[in-house]
Image (cartoon, rainbow, N blue to C red):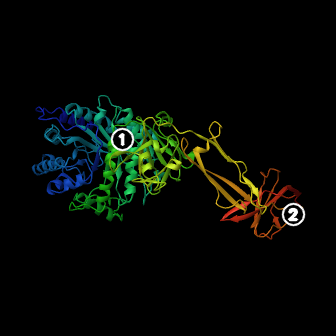
Amino acid sequence: MLLIMVLAIISSFFTYSYAANTKPAKKNKGNFEIQYYLGPDAMQIASDDKLAKRIADAGFTVIALQPSYKDVNEMVGLWAYADAEGAAALKKALKRLDDNDIKVYLKLGTISGDLVEGGVWNDHSQKLAKKYLDGRYDNVIGVDLGDEPRIYSAQQYAAAMVQLHKTFPNVESYFNLFPIYAADAVLGIGDSYTTYTRAYYEKYLRAFFNQKNVNHGLFVFSADYYPRLRGWSGPHETDVSYYENLDYLLTISKENKGSIPMNLVGLSDGLIDPTREDHIMYQVNTNLAFGMKRISYFTGIDPCVDPVYDAIKTEAHAQGIAYGWNAGWVFEKDGTPSKIYGVIKKVNAKVKPLGNLLYPKEVLSVDRICKKKKSNRSYYGKREYLKKVGDVSIKKSSAASSGLVTAFSDGTIMLTNGSADTPVSFTVTKYALKDMDYFNTKSGTWKSIGKIMNAQKQKSKAIQLEDGKLFPADNTVRLDGGTAIVLRVKSGAKPLKKIGKTYLSVSSYTYNGKKQKEPVIYVKDSKGKKIAKSNYTVTKPKTQLKAIGKYTYTIRFKGDYIGIKKLTLTIKPAKPTIKAPRAAKNTVIVKWNKGKKGQVTGYQVMAATNSKFTKNTKALTIKGYGKTSAKMAKLKAKTKYYVKVRTYKTVKGVKIYSNWSEVKTIQTK
């Protein structure tokens, strides 16, 4: 019965008889937007003549606006739409926001409810539609329907969206969905509040999209999976992925005619450090890397929204909870900027030009790359796109964390640091950096890397960027924590030629007290042909090839080849002479001739039950050049063992081993 009543209410809302619109509502013509979610309400903005400008100055372009948070239980205050005082405040707030070019979603849904559970589609909604959606306030671009509805509300929401878009063709509908780690029962599927299934989550998402007659091009949706960068972790952290949730949102938007996806950027102190730019930028850039078309900041409840903030804080303290999850507010109680206001302003200044650049682009693939290739993972699309678009591929990431590679349909590539705290390096392997441009977020323009290289040729080997460095010598891009870069290949650029096998004619010598002969360096391409010396330079060791140690030859490629190869030649200590071993019960005593002082630091002895030393292997390290024997105990009784020994010398903290001695055999007692 309740469901029938709700549907009747929805129908009455959208079948209301309207006069002709005085002017069309302002359209969002494919714009990237930065949304302020659950910020100051209309009452606060109306009473503070500076607040709207502060919101705009921070870089926000859209606000999900409630008339008032007076109703603590539902945090909706829908009464204000019809209440004379509230309506006047809303009208004044909309005017101030419009004067500062801030668009508005009028918030209808509860903070955590469904249409079925305490929904807000009632007679006030009719007045709202007549007053605020018919074009009189052209900065009202849409309706915020609700937050985290369960699956059984899907059809009702779809019906509401159909009627909304039919009656108001330019009005967007927006609501926030549950994230992937929500329990099955929370989603409205299954009966467990402690477990989730990915299949259920996919079913949950599609329930809100696979509806007929919905104008998905005007449907803006989000989820709020926040990365845990500090302070808190939940049981789902090892089971599901922040990236995976973004992947789901991107996939769903592609399946449904260009619906506009977002993922909320959290500013809560328990999850991230909201005073750190890199923690916020990490969330923003990973969102953009997965094709999110807009950014929405969730600040919890700003302190200026009274009495909701105080009510939540009081309840938390009563339960012995330190109220820190909300410390990422942008404004204080009196509407003045908070301590993180400047950080948000700085981040948004970078985000806006990058978001505008990426908004119209179609994501072809998103890949996570790691230092260990086994940890690599393809998310949306296929990694083959990186080759098809004729741009760049990624060779490695220098950090154990990860990096993201996003390929767009127009050939541009976005590299994103997968860590908020540490730098990550990407090696571009297909085109030379000098033949590429990068997008400068400060100026909002493309910059030629080749021109920058020419200008800094005599100044520095590395090119300093806004958020990292370029190293042209080995075609590497080093990004600071939380940052990203967008690259494109210049028209007419030719792919780099591939480097093949590069090696020394000899890899090691045995120490003899004399200077050793310089090795021949062989440099070949991928087809095995010799590369001309004009395409590389060689830096030889600074010291003579005489003392025990390792010597490095560095090959730096240029011209048609890019990269750095390092080849190592080792001068080893002389191997020892092993003597006949002696046997005892479960024991073998190995003997050898003493090495020379200054040439030997110690010895390594090895025993095994086969000649290849792969079975029942045991090794001992004996320190001191004067040692001449070692006891290998706890061996198998009456078993034939193979034994051998070698010397080592420690040079700059590294053990340099000799060749092994000859192998002796003996049977234990």
Q: Secondary structure at mark 2?
A: loop
Say whether residue 154 is left or right of residue 394: left
Q: Name the spot of residue 373 as percent of width and height, x first.
A: 57, 46
646 shown above or below 519: below
Q: Name the spot of residue 427 as percent of width and height, x first.
A: 52, 47
Which of the two discs, 2 and 1, labels the residue nearer the N terminus?
1
- Looking at this rendering, what residue extends furthest in the top direction? 213
Q: Quadrant of the C terminus?
A: bottom right
Residue at (87, 59) in percent of width and height = 668
Residue at (11, 31) in percent of width and height = 20
Q: Amino acid at mark 1?
A: Leu
In the rendered structure, find residue 457 and report the number of the disc placed on it. Answer: none
| Residue 258 appears in the picture as rendered | yes
Please give the residue where the numbered disc 2 appears in the rendered image.
Answer: 585
The residue closer to the viewer here, 176 or 624, is 624
405 shown above or below 549: above
Q: Secondary structure at mark 1?
A: helix
Say whether residue 655 is left or right of residue 79: right
Residue at (80, 57) in percent of width and height = 660
Q: Amino acid at mark 2?
A: Lys
Q: Name the spot of residue 86 as percent of width and height, x first.
A: 13, 50
Res 151 quadrant in image: top left
- Label 1 neighbourhood size at 10 Å, few (<14), some (14-19), many (20+)? many
Res 659 quadrant in image: bottom right
Res 278 quadrant in image: bottom left
Closer mark to the observer between disc 2 and disc 1? 1
The residue closer to the viewer here, 539 or 265, is 539
- Label 2 neighbourhood size at 10 Å, few (<14), some (14-19), many (20+)? some
| Residue 194 appears in the picture as rendered | no
Please give the residue where the numbered disc 1 appears in the rendered image.
Answer: 358
